[in-house]
Every structure is written in structure tokens, then in C-alpha cells.
Amino acid sequence: LRAESAHPTERSRGNAHTSEKKLIYVLIRLEQSQTIDSNKIFIAGLPTNMSEQVLFDKLCDVFLTVGKIKINRRTGKPWINLLRQKDNKCQLSGNAGITFEEEESVIEAIKKYNR
């Protein structure tokens, strides 16, 4: 799994850190003045063959260790957006976005998972 900044020009690469079978890279936007919310992260390299609910639950469990995930008012669930493939909306793309309540949670996620 790999998490990156939500801003495409600020993505970078790193070495994998393992926990269970795979784990997560987390990279933050470097410029706080960008219009992208600083309490969001983008994750790439997620499994596409895992059930949506299992993947959602795993991401929730992992990222709740660094801070509170914002609750989506419409669904009442943590704000974890599992993205789908452009050409096949039934298939997960292996990418996700997570919105935290606090920017400090993003910083903690980086400290913990960016190896």
C-alpha cells in the first residue's frame, strides 16, 4: 500500500514498510498554502481484489491509530473514499482518500507509515 499527497506535483517515492502483508506510505503536501485540505491523505497501491468492506475496515483500523477520521454526514461512516477504476466503476482502483478531523493526524500518519 502506498499513500501520497493529494496534490499530484508533490508526490514522491519511498521504500516499502511491511506490517501484516503490506503497509502504507504516507506523504504530505509540503506547501500549506495550497487549496487542498491539509487534513486529507491519498493512498495508492491498495489491493484491488479485496472486498470493499474488508478494505474499508482495514484502512479505518490502521489510520484510527494516528487520529480521528472525520465522519461523513451523509453516510455516518468514517470519511474513507475508496476510488474506482475509470473504465469499470465496479472495480476498485487501488487508491483511496482519507479525511481526518485534524491536520496533526496527517502528520502522525506520515511519522508512523512513511518509511
Image: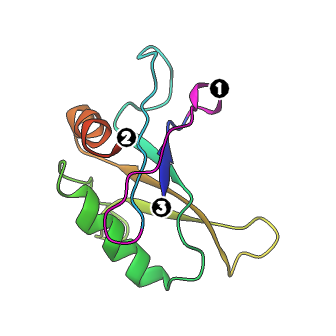
In depth, the one of 14 and 6 nearer the eye is 14
- Is 30 located above or below residue 40 in the figure? above
Q: Which residue is mark 2?
A: 115
Residue drawn at (38%, 30%), measured in percent from left and top?
Answer: 38
Mark 2: secondary structure: loop
**Separation (CA) of disc 3 from disc 2:** 23 Å
Residue 9 is labelled as 1
Q: In the picture provided, is 4 more to the left or to the right than 99?
A: right
Q: Is residue 91 above or below residue 16?
A: below
The residue nearer to you, when weighing 44 against 35, is 44
Element marked by disc 3: strand
Span colored in magenta: 7-21
Near mark 2 (Cα within 10 A), the count class, few <14, some 14-19 or many ≥20, is some
Secondary structure predominantly adopted by residues drawn in magenta: loop
Amino acid type at image mark 3:
Asn
- Residue matched to label 3: 81
Sequence-wise first label, 2 or 1: 1
